[in-house]
Image (cartoon, grey):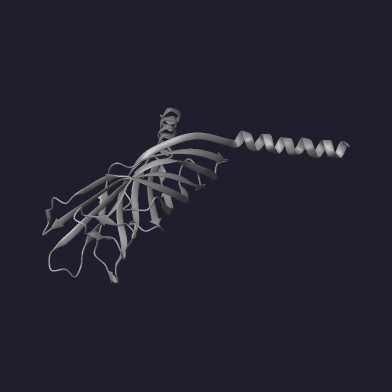
């Protein structure tokens, strides 16, 4: 009986100690996205042009830190994701720009020094809710712009994974890859005159991007506090 009580007491002590080291808090930040795409248009590859999206990319994370070197993250985000496609093998200089605003739900981990350098990564599901498509011929924008909410031109959701680094003072560098194709190849449209077409049939595009962020996990505040304390103690 005494042994059982001792084991129970030790277990409770370990649990309480681990709970005392666990920190739960919220963070958030912006990011600049530099996106690319692997494109296969009915067997014709290439044509991707880098797309820069400085806005509107907002993310909020819940952080659960289990000690100083490991933590979990979860949250929500709004992402501006798309691609620019210079259509090859055409008689005209044809360029297409595609963009989605997505509502994203990430879940992942942090590994390293929670207040300084760390690696973070995980899985993210994204739900597109606002689609835009623009056409350029010889760099002149055409009137055939498409802007729509909850479009059937794209899948209902995207699956993606991300991996990033956070450096001292909170600067972040992240890589993200979308396993889901950007377009819904089965989408069918009617031009109102009885002509039915599938504009994205055979157009396979998997987006990936590199992004830059700052203070995503508020580590910059820790550094500034450390500098202030150092100056106070030594000057």
Q: Can residue 90 be seen in this view?
A: yes
Residue positioned 70% across, 38% down in the render: 14
The image position of residue 104, as x and y in percent, is 41, 44
- Is 189 in front, or is 227? 189
- Is 76 in front, or is 209? 76
- Asked which quadrant contains residue 7, the reply is top right
Q: Can residue 166 be seen in this view?
A: no
The image position of residue 124, as x and y in percent, is 44, 49
- Asked which quadrant contains residue 137, the reply is bottom left
Query: Quick check: 13 above or below 46?
Result: above
Query: Quick check: 59 above or below 200?
Result: above
- Is 206 in front, or is 4? 206
Location of the N terminus (image quadrant) = top right
Taking the image as shown, residue 33 lies to the left or right of residue 75, namely left
Residue positioned 13% across, 63% down in the render: 93
Location of the C terminus (image quadrant) = top left
Taking the image as shown, residue 205 lies to the left or right of residue 2, namely left
The image position of residue 133, as x and y in percent, is 23, 51
- Is 64 in front, or is 18? 64
Taking the image as shown, residue 59 lies to the left or right of residue 44, namely right
- Residue reaching furthest to the front: 194
The image position of residue 52, as x and y in percent, is 26, 50
How many callouts does the rendering have?
0
Query: Quick check: 85 above or below 66?
Result: below
- Residue reaching furthest to the right: 1
């Amino acid at each position: 009986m005494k042994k059982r009580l001792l084991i129970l007491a030790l277990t409770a002590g370990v649990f309480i100690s681990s709970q005392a080291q666990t920190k739960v808090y919220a963070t958030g930040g912006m990011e600049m996205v530099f996106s690319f795409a692997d494109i296969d248009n009915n067997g014709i590859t290439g044509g991707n042009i880098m797309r820069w999206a400085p806005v509107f990319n907002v993310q909020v994370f819940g952080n659960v830190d289990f000690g100083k070197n490991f933590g979990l993250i979860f949250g929500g985000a709004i992402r501006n994701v798309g691609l620019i496609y210079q259509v090859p093998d055409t008689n005209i200089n044809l360029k297409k720009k595609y963009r989605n605003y997505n509502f994203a739900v990430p879940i992942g981990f942090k590994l390293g020094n929670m207040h300084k350098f760390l690696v973070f990564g995980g899985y993210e599901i994204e739900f597109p809710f606002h689609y835009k498509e623009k056409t350029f011929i010889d760099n002149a924008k055409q009137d055939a712009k498409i802007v729509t909410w909850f479009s059937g031109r794209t899948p209902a959701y995207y699956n993606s994974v991300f991996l990033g680094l956070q450096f001292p003072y909170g600067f972040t560098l992240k890589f993200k890859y979308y396993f889901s194709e950007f377009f819904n190849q089965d989408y069918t449209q009617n031009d109102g005159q009885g002509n039915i077409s599938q504009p994205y049939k055979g157009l396979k595009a998997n987006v990936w991007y590199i992004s830059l962020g700052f203070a995503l996990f508020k580590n910059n505040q820790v550094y500034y506090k450390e500098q202030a304390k150092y100056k106070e103690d030594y000057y």
